[in-house]
Image (cartoon, rainbow, N blue to C red):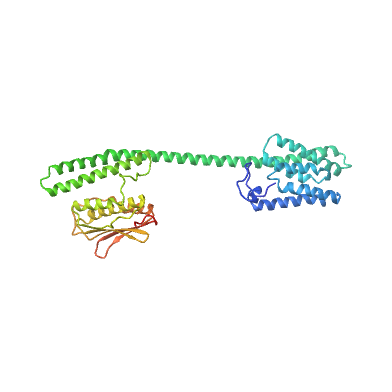
Amino acid sequence: MESPGASPGAAPARTRGWLGWWGGRFRSLCFDLLVTVMVLEGVFVHHAVSALLAVCAVVVCAPALLLRRRFPWLAVAATVTVAFTGAVSWMACVAGYTAARGWGPGRRLWIASGLLSLAMIPGYYRALAGSADRLAYVVVIPLLAVAASVLLGLWVFQRGALLASLRDRAEQAERERDLLAERAVEAERRRIAREMHDVVAHRVSVISLQAGGLSVSAPDDRTAQIAEVIRRTSASALSELREALKVLRVHQPMDSGSGSPTLDGIATLVEDTVAAGANLQADLPDPLPEVSGAVGRAAYRVVQEALTNATKHAPHAAIRVTLNVAEDRLEVTVTNRRGAGSHTFAVPGSGYGLIGMRERVTLAGGTLHTGGTDDGGYRVRAVFPLGADEVAA
């Protein structure tokens, strides 16, 4: 019989250490010690056997009872071995329960049950000496005792098997749910990719085409210069959009090659912004530090989004971009002054710019600080950690 709360089931407990034979539970070991003491007490107290036979019975039964969970055959064999003492009633019940719980229904169990029933007969035969119904009791009582213990063990075995089956079904249902969720995500990714290709890519292509035509037929150099900036920016946007569409369709990481922005691209981004008419000043170290691809992309996106927000919410205001390598970190700062008056043609915002910047910086292992300045402007400051091999010599 098992202690309350012991985990049922035929499968061995996945535990480590010397408690593995008791399901990894110290309370199970204590329970088995208690059962061993109670069963062996009958050898000395309730049955008149010689001291030598009692000691032999203890030496045989004690290890078998303590290790019965791991080796059910030991308990059965010990019961048959000490049948001559007559103190096998509880021993046989414990062995029958252990065999049924460990093996389940099968040939081994029926053989063990028969042996246990036979082992109980000598004790009851001597105990019922002189009884009129001696033969009936000698046969019936052992069978009933063993049958009751075996049925209890089978019930625990089936209960454990049922719980294991329910657990497997729950895990399978969870895996199927995750699979369905992944399929839904994949379908949504493909739908988004189609929408981006059909709408965004088409419109950006039209902008690039019109800007190219304007740069050729511009009435003056300034207009041609701005049109060329628009064309290059549109072409760059299309290249990055193709990378994003590839990620959405085939679910692969962003390529860190030429199509993906890096820290070196900040200089080109600043030049294009200045060529478009922005009042921008940049302080970039020369040479630029060697950083990982994740840090380079995140820094580029921070500058890009900060410049977009500055030209959107404070047009024609002075903007300053600063990259600074201090000890083991890279600091990227974009500060703009307060815009001069209100602007009628403000570009509508999505509200996700700062959220996207914070997510990118966090994924790169950095921190982002944003907020207003004392003169009414706005500052975006991102700090990225650099390894010893990432800082430029």
Position of 139 with respect to 351 (left or right) is right
Residue 134 place in picture, x, y as percent: 85, 39
Residue drawn where x is 12% and y is 44% of the image = 218
**Can the viewer see residue 45 in this picture?**
no
Q: Is residue 37 left or right of residue 269?
A: right
Asked whether 76 or 290 is in front, the reply is 290
Location of residue 364 in the rendering, given as x and y in whole percent from the top left corner: 37, 53
Considering every residue shown, the one lying at the far top of the view is: 107
User: What x and y, as percent, mark residue 355?
Assistant: 33, 53
User: In the rendered view, does 179 fall on the left or right side of 373?
Assistant: right
Q: Nearer the viewer, residue 244 or 100?
A: 244
The residue most toward the right is 130
**Nearest the camera: 77 or 136?**
77
Residue farthest toward the front in the current orientation of the protein: 393
Q: Quadrant of the C terminus?
A: bottom left
Q: Residue furthest left?
A: 219
Image height check: is 110 above or below 262?
Answer: above
Residue 257 figure quarter: top left
Q: How many marks?
A: 0
Q: Residue at x 82, y 50 (%)?
A: 55
Q: Nearer the viewer, residue 262 or 200?
A: 262
Taking the spot 72% from the left edge, 52% from the top edge, the residue there is 34
Where residue 95 sits, quadrant-wise, is top right
Q: Position of residue 280 (x, y in %)?
A: 21, 57
Q: Is residue 7 above or below residue 107?
A: below
Q: Is residue 206 visible?
A: yes
Q: Would you place residue 389 above or below residue 232 in this image?
A: below
